[in-house]
Image: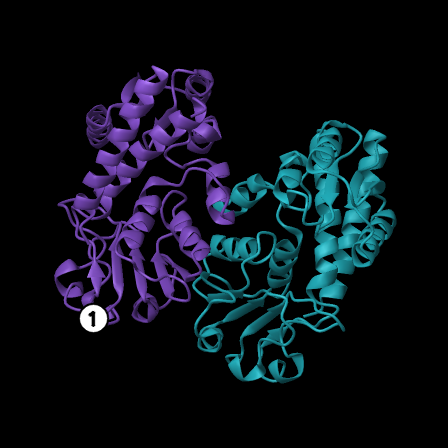
Chain colours: A purple, B cyan
Amino acid sequence: MDGAGLARRVVEETATRAAELTRSTGVTPCLATVLVGEDPASVTYVRMKQARSAKAGILSRHVGLPATTTTAELVETITALSNDPTVHGILLQHPVGPHIDERAAFEAIAPGKDVDGVTMHSFAAMSFGLPGFVSCTPGGIMRLLEEYDVELAGKHAVVVGRSAILGKPAGMLLLAKDATVTYCHSRTANLSALVKEADIVVAAVGRPRLIRGEDIKPGAVVIDAGYNPGNVGDVDFDTARTRAGLITPVPGGVGPMTIAVLLAQTVEAAARQLGT
Amino acid sequence: MDGAGLARRVVEETATRAAELTRSTGVTPCLATVLVGEDPASVTYVRMKQARSAKAGILSRHVGLPATTTTAELVETITALSNDPTVHGILLQHPVGPHIDERAAFEAIAPGKDVDGVTMHSFAAMSFGLPGFVSCTPGGIMRLLEEYDVELAGKHAVVVGRSAILGKPAGMLLLAKDATVTYCHSRTANLSALVKEADIVVAAVGRPRLIRGEDIKPGAVVIDAGYNPGNVGDVDFDTARTRAGLITPVPGGVGPMTIAVLLAQTVEAAARQLGT
């Protein structure tokens, strides 16, 4: 499944919409990026998001905070962005460091600006099928499945991983589309047997090549949302591709879709806030 | 599994705690019950909750609204209760009638008074393992499993049903206890085969005797959260009991636990609001 190609199209559509919005309202959509500390991988991610934003006609407002920032200071910073009418979306780069209450920081993001889909409100909205912003990676997965006309109703989706921003919301979005959903994780007794039943596998656990080709049911759709050092996913691509009906590569699968959804949701947030 | 017996003990503990709280603070815990219209079953449920509250030393404040109440009026009523310091918990009796936006009404309940666990905040808190109030029926199920020392970590729990106040939160609470969780529902292709795999079955779908004994894995724990006309659960009790290791009856299983959790959470809410 060509996530990179689909992401390009989504970003092009987003750029067109951003340009129209800027023209009709005089306001350019703006994404605030908040980074605590100077973790090299996080710095790279944030720069990449800013560069993609610029290409799509979205302004970036970067807030870099020292690694010593307290929870209260971070909450205050994010609250100010939530209240700032010139900011339409807010991204807090994860992780924020162990001394910070990340949940408190996330919750300071106004639901209407939660374009990364990390708040409790957004999670519940995804779970209940209510309007709101989705977590970007699960949202990107759903967009890929839609693009490839993957039937979900009545199919068995096995989600490996249960993080708050990836596994859990991915399962809830699949459930909302009438899939039967199984959540597996590090404590699951017989992962291999459960994956073998899956019509759709979502690997979102961060363990290199955990899912082997021999466990893929022939014809199954395999979504690899893992990203491990050395450009390796959670799925053993070479063995899985021979059995899967559809499969996402790493890189070039889910990854590009994540940023595409972030940008699309930022423009959507701006449109709603600007009342268009 | 003797839900009625455990519920009696939980209510006794709750009554003791309520009495201590009243003695030490001079304030008696108060549960507001809100009922829209005069649906006979809803009237009965609310009266039962009030009677149990009284026995546990919890005040009831009943707000009965006509069936013609609008969403805006209901939201206003609930918001006033959320802001009223003499009310510690709020229960909006479900269902509220098709012309009302039930979600908007639920969301008017302050998270700290959401003793029925129906808000988006409470759902996300359950899902993320954060402090908060649980949905009462799933909370009652978890308390029963704990009481009977049912091991959950690594076990396969199959939840049949995906409602916002029962199936979905039950699955999330089981997942938080490290169970592998499968959500089945009306669109699930092969329910029987999936139930056969379950170490723990939670039936929460409202279809009389949907789960048959032949589908129960020998020794499995069967929780019947269904309640259908004629005191019939979602599980065919007579055939399932011969294979299950543990099973809840209907009535006398999950039902009494639901109210017990409601009362316990009301007293907990009062204790938190009174700063004890």
Q: Is residue A68 visible?
A: no
Local secondary structure at mark 1: helix
A239 vs A138, nearest the viewer: A138
Q: Which residue is mark 1?
A: A214
Observer-nearest residue: A132 or B2? A132
Q: Chain of mark 1?
A: A
Residue B167 location, x and y as percent? Answer: 56, 58
Q: For residue B86, which quarter of the picture?
A: top right
Q: Quadrant of residue B244?
A: bottom right
In the image, residue B194 lies at what x, y percent?
Answer: 45, 73
The N terminus of chain A appears in which quarter of the rendering? bottom left
Nearest to the observer: residue A276 or residue A100 = A276
Q: Quadrant of residue B120?
A: top right
Q: Nearer the viewer, residue B48 or B78?
A: B78
Q: Is residue A166 left or right of residue B187?
A: left
Asked if A219 appears above or below A124 in the picture, the reply is: below
Compared with residue A133, is residue B146 higher up or lower down, i.e. above or below?
Answer: below
Image height of A246 relative to A133, above or below: below
Residue at 49%, 42% (x, y): give it: A125
Residue located 73% across and 44% down the image: B91
Q: Residue A230, position in %: x, y?
A: 13, 45
- The answer to whether residue B160 is visible is yes
**Which amino acid, by three-letter code, is at mark 1?**
Glu
Q: Residues within 10 Å of mark 1 (few under 14, many from 20)?
A: some
- The quadrant of the rendering that contains the C terminus of chain A is top left
Q: How many numbered circles are shown?
A: 1
Taking the image as shown, residue A251 lies to the left or right of residue B43, namely left
